[in-house]
Image (spheres, rainbow, N blue to C red):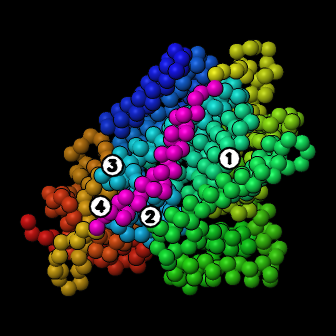
Amino acid sequence: MKKDQYINFAWQAAAFIMGLLITWAFLNNPTPRQFGLAFRYDFLQIMAPLAVIVFLVLKLPYNISRFLLLGIISAILVLPIAGLWASGQSEQYILGGIIPFSDARFYFTDSHRLLEGSVFFTGAARRPLFTTLMSSIQWLTGQNLPLTIAVLTLILGYAMYFATYEFRTREGAIAGSVFLVLLYSYARLLLGKTLSEFAGLPLGLLALVFMLRGITRKQLKLMITGLFLLSLGLNARAGAFFILPVLALWTGWYFRKSGGLHWRSFILACLAVVLGFLINLVAFNTYSSPDSAPFGNFSFTIYGVARGGLGWTQVFTEHPETWEMPTGEQSRYIYSLTLDIIRRKPMNLVKGILSSYQTFFSLDDYYGSLCWFGDQGVTGTIARIGYYLLMLTGLFFCIKNIKNPVRSFYLTSFIGIVLSIPFAPPIDSNRMRVYAATIPFFISIPGIGLASLADHLPWEFFRPDKTEFPSLIPPKTLSAVLVIMMTVQPLIPFKSTHSETPPIFSCSTGLKPVSFRILPGNHIRIVDQDSIQQEWISIIREKTMANRIHNLPNWETYDLFSNVKPGQVILVDLDLQTKNPMILIAEWEKVSQKSGIQTLCGRPSTDIMLREYNVFFAEEYMPE
């Protein structure tokens, strides 16, 4: 290794350590609530200064630039989480700033189910790869949810760092700063939540790194690696699947030696894509319940499109009998209903497709493709219009310079995303969650547009400049770790764990035995309003909980959580008696003194609106 390589390695190692230390510092020390939440919710006040700072950092010498960039990324990722933990804020998919809820709850509880030696059973079983990743991290951290969230954030941060610098290397500092700001705008409301985007987005970013380097070096193996990672990311977080075949075709075209298609490259690209699906299928057959079906909820989506774009819930409105069906039977039945609708009313399908495109390219601040960019006011509307203008500019320059392989690559990626829109309709995308794996490709276009415009400026400082290519060893290492943690590592606890028998407790009439563990992050302890100055990880004041519960869209739970009294605890985890997810309301002093599995007798909620949550109220506690 040459002296320059030693120096580069030392700087890179220092950057990784700094990122780790920044994450540890912010997530172990209470942060002023408003400061953290500003990075989560504010737009102009955060994004404008961030874009300028990142641009100036990217103009610095190579090693200093990389060092500072990773520090900035680490800080801006952990601050929104620290804001949640310091506020007790509830949001979609999160309760009290920490507890996974709705979809996030399924991934969380199923990861614990695997650690108990059982298969995935909830909606997470349909796409098991993120849940296996969660299980691996939970196993390594001793089922410590805050630490698990920190690890997921680090993985995302490193992937953002690799992709941002790879993009900057080709397109210049101004494009790199736009790329990072857009990426952060998309990711920040997901931070702190146990959602499958934390598999799809890092894998999509890593895929972009390898593909860009493969184009630059004209190395097929790097392009194939990128396609495999993108396929794996789309299997973990289903979304714009049509990007895979169009990029496979592009690979065959790019590596041709003369006219036509280079069939060997095309076939290898297809095999890389298929490998991602095969790994997902093997994971499904290994870790998921046989009553589940891979991508079973896609049947809901396509039914909604066939009904004219009415959304995935429409099938349950029109056919409530499907709600209680086993997953496999449910999917087959809904597909048959969908085909019948298409035969009888084909124009409804056309209407649904057109509606998807109209919504995707709208300025809508919830369903539009840019709902994550800007706020809900005039500023947000102007920002989204500006994005579209830069996107059109980028597409123009991609078409103009289509003989440039990088430009044709981005144009092909964009076409693949656009072709996928009817099968990942915005009305079902929930703030574009389903596009997580392909969002790095989507947000590259505006950066190219701005960089192309800057290239015509008279000031050299703003023009795209060349810089040294970073080593691929770190992204290769991270990619390998992610693949292992999704596939092989979960086998260790799954096959070696012998489910511990919960303590036996005889309950009075009308009560049921409930078994659980008190673990970091699986509960919220309610305290008097004056007992603490600020919330922090699982300790929330009574009025704060009641006031901030209303950002949780699950309105049927408002009364339940608002009426929890000081001294009580809300626990969301598995009932180890049945291995089913549950919510338990209990007295903190009576459950906090014991370690390991404990059993009590709870009264099931009689509220029909809470039936799906499996709610228990503790009434009888096992004596010491």
Between 298 and 530, the one lying in front of the other is 298
Q: Mark 4 and mark 2: span between their CA atoms? A: 17 Å
The magenta-colored residue range is 469-498
Give the mark toward the camera: 1 or 2. Answer: 1
10 Å crowding of disc 4: few (<14), some (14-19), many (20+): many
Query: Circle 4 sits on which residue?
Result: 570
Residue in view at x 52 percent, y 21 percent: 1
Give how far across and how far down residue 355 sits, in percent. Answer: 76, 62
Q: Quadrant of residue 581?
A: bottom left
Q: Where does the C terminus fall, quadrant-wise?
A: bottom left
Query: Circle 1 sits on which residue?
Result: 224
The amino acid on which the numbered mark 1 sits, given as a three-letter code, is Ile
Q: Which mark is residue 106?
A: 2
The amino acid on which the numbered mark 2 sits, given as a three-letter code, is Phe
Give the mark toward the camera: 3 or 4. Answer: 3
The amino acid on which the numbered mark 3 sits, given as a three-letter code, is Thr
10 Å crowding of disc 2: few (<14), some (14-19), many (20+): many
Of mark 3 and mark 2, the one earlier in the sequence is 2
Give how far across and how far down residue 444 sits, in percent. Answer: 70, 38
The amino acid on which the numbered mark 4 sits, given as a three-letter code, is Ile
10 Å crowding of disc 3: few (<14), some (14-19), many (20+): some
Of mark 1 and mark 2, the one earlier in the sequence is 2
Residue in view at x 48 percent, y 45 percent: 481
Query: Circle 3 sits on which residue?
Result: 141
Q: Do the numbered discs 3 and 4 sit on residues whose CB atoms are within 8 Å? A: no
Of mark 3 and mark 4, the one earlier in the sequence is 3
Residue in view at x 36 percent, y 53 percent: 138
Give the mark toward the camera: 4 or 1. Answer: 1
Give how far across and how far down residue 61 sits, in percent. Answer: 58, 15
